[in-house]
Amino acid sequence: MKETGLKGKIALITGGNRGLGKDVALRLAGYGSGVIITYRSHQDEAMAVVAQIEQKNQKAEAIQLDISQINKLDEFCGQVIQKLRDVWGTDKLNFLINNAGFGGRAPIGQTPEAVFDNLFNVHFKGVYFLTEKILPLISDNGRIVNYSSGLTRFAVPGLAAYASMKGAIEVFTKYLAKELGSRGITANLVAPGAIDNDFNKTNFDAHPEIKDFLASQTALGRIGVSEDIGGVVAFLCSEDARWVTAQRIEASGGMFL
């Protein structure tokens, strides 16, 4: 197997207990990286992911984190430092994957402030300040991967607030790339299309016809699954992507072209 530059590295993946984050964790572990995943709830899912990674003879840890609770980020970073020292014998990690998130649908004019604030805290403010606090732990020539959405390219009614947070993340990622370039750290975005996983389960269960419609509007003729995204993130973490930064990669199968 071609050397990817991932063996022996360590990744921190938020929301790694399910969905896209879980696939990224398993994919990186498969290439030889150690993994720290976070979970907001569902500790059982997180520990199941850790067990799967350990079966690959890689080290993995899980730490509880509600990224919207900014006042607890210092405590969380202290836990990360302790895990790095105790498990890997280091005080540095290589990759930060800001994956944690949730969906939210409300038309303009009918968006409760509490819903808006929760979207903001999880998808932008939490990502911004977690990244800021983790930066001292990221080794030079490390990688940061953030998530955007196809919704910053096309508009779907009811998703203005969510899409706006992702637009903010796109700008933030460009600034990360610019300011961290002197350290050799890259910062990039992955924008998944519609994915058939827990993130979209409520909407798909309520409106099963949406799947067929979205598949008909996708060049490759289906909607995505979590396993379609992990390899893209792994590539951005690899040595092959060392010259890629400040880029938005839409992994959507050609949705709404």
Image: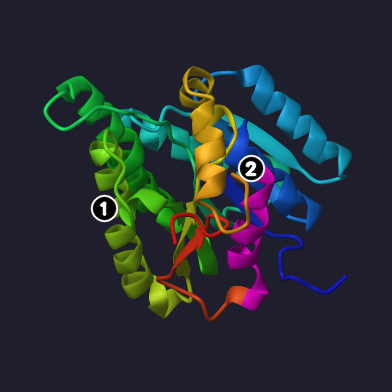
Say which quarter of the image contains residue 141. bottom right
Of 195 and 214, which appears nearest the observer? 214
At which x and y percent is residue 53? Answer: 79, 40
Residue drawn at 20 percent across, 21 percent down: 114
At which x and y percent is residue 164? Answer: 25, 46
For the N terminus, which image quadrant? bottom right
Q: Main secondary structure of the magenta part?
A: helix
The extreme left residue here reads 109
Question: What residue is shown with label 1?
Answer: 168
Q: Which residues are magenta?
A: 225-240
Classify residue 133 as left or right of residue 106. right
Sooner in the amino-acid sequence: mark 1 or mark 2:
1
In the rendered view, how is the structure colored? rainbow
**Mark 1–mark 2 distance (CA, rounded to whole Å):** 24 Å
Residue drawn at 52 percent across, 53 percent down: 96
Q: Is residue 244 visible?
A: yes
Q: Is residue 85 visible?
A: no
Q: Callout 1 environment at 10 Å: few (<14), some (14 to 19), or many (20+)?
A: some
Residue kind at label 2, given as amino acid type: Ser
At which x and y percent is residue 173? Answer: 35, 62
Question: What residue is shown with label 2?
Answer: 226
Residue kind at label 1, given as amino acid type: Ala
Classify residue 125 as left or right of residue 187. left
Classify residue 100 as left or right of residue 151. right
Q: Secondary structure at mark 1?
A: helix
Residue drawn at 64 percent across, 42 percent down: 225
